[in-house]
Amino acid sequence: MAKIKTVRIVKTCYETYALHYINPDGRRRRLSVGSDYQLAQRQAVRFSDWLIEGKDPEQELEKANQVEKVKNISVREFYPIFMERHGSLQSKNMQESYFYSFKNICRCPDIANSSINLISKRMVLDYMQLRMKQDGVTAATVNREAVFVKGMLSHAVELDILEHNPLSGLKLFREAEKREVHLTTEQAGTLINKLQEPISSIVELAIYTGFRKENILDLRIESIRIHDLTPTGEVELIVKGGKQEVFPLSPAAVEVIKRNIGDRKEGHLFINPKTGKKFYSIHKGFNKAVRELGLTVNGTKFRFHDLRHVFATWLHQAGVSLDIVRPLLGHRDRKTTDRYTTYDRLSSRKVLEFIPIIRRKNEHEKMAKIV
């Protein structure tokens, strides 16, 4: 390795300054740094530090220029980078959430076209207030979009594009009270019986497991293991964050799974009879049944995601601790699980009788069709 010599500042005939030094490869280099002598002195100190560390000043300058260039990238331009590095590792449902949040953010040029290093809390709060006023959306919706922008900037910090997240400490708007999901066993049975197979089985499995819709639609036979000695089982799912976790299956869930697997050994558990492939959406049939039955939650329509609330509520009302329900829902925070439970007049005994009630109703309906 060449001996490190002091970086010299030399004035050129053009009244500018150049730095003379020997790079780590032992080659003599001369680099122009402009006509400002103080700037030349500062650059000489930086070059000396890099040489002591065994780094090539020219390469380090190029890296610094690239970082500075990336810092000026807009939110709109950074989105593809964020999705490639981070979004692609998330669940399909989360990716869709990112897409719609970004789509709405792009309606605000002040944020979408601003450099990520210029985004401020005031800009985001103004956007949140304006969106609620103009579009009539809830605080939960604008909070989700604000968290999306904050998450993008956090990822920029991880990539060393930003030194810190300017939205760190952003206070979100107070959201409405949790969804009070009151679904009786009779209503659940009626909903399942009103749906066509295999959508009725999809809804039934959602109630028995609390799994998210995308997890159920993506469920493959190869990821399911049914126990030999007990009428239970387990399944591997990709949860939020792209992590793979194992979840237990109750006897009722196993019955639904066996009914839909048949003699198959592989492939998706639920197959769309019209396409012969997996389901990509069941909203049309599900929403129609919900509408005809008049099922609502807090004055809004009953959603498929509310079946997770039903699963959590009935378990808790049957005497199961929230600390046990929490991992079954894939939650990290117990407070999140608490938002999924609703206290009503449904008795524990009725909860425990729920499974055979629905199964008998389904079987009676199928037998009636056969006869």
Image (cartoon, rainbow, N blue to C red):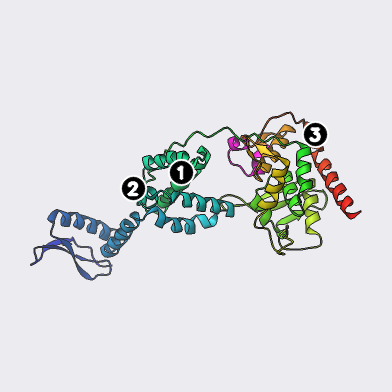
Q: How many marks?
A: 3
Specify the quadrant of the image occupied by residue 330: top right
The residue under label 2 is: 118
- What amino acid type is highlighted by mark number 1? Ala
Residue 60 or 101: which is nearer the viewer?
Answer: 101
The mark that comes first in sequence, 2 or 3, is 2
What x and y, as percent, mark residue 49? 25, 56
Query: What's the residue type where badge 3 is placed?
Result: Lys
Query: What residue occupies the far right of the structure in this picture?
Result: 371
Is 43 situated left or right of 293 in this image? left
Residue under label 1: 146
Q: Label 2 to label 3, Cα distance in Å? A: 57 Å
Q: Callout 1: few (<14), some (14-19), or many (20+) C-alpha neighbours within 10 Å? A: many
Residue interval drawn in magenta? 324-337
Task: Give SS at disc 2.
Answer: helix
Q: Earlier in the sequence, mark 3 or mark 1?
A: 1
Gap between marks 3 and 1, in whole Å? 42 Å
Q: Is residue 54 visible?
A: no
The picture quadrant where one finds residue 79 is: bottom left
In the rendered image, residue 284, in percent from the top left (x then y), is placed at: 67, 52
Q: Earlier in the sequence, mark 2 or mark 1?
A: 2
Front residue of 353/61: it is 353
Q: Is residue 125 magenta?
A: no
Hey, what amino acid is under mark 2? Answer: Leu
Which residue shows up at 31% across the image and 56% down it?
68
In this rendered view, identify the residue nearer to me: 323 or 180: 180
Q: Is residue 328 magenta?
A: yes
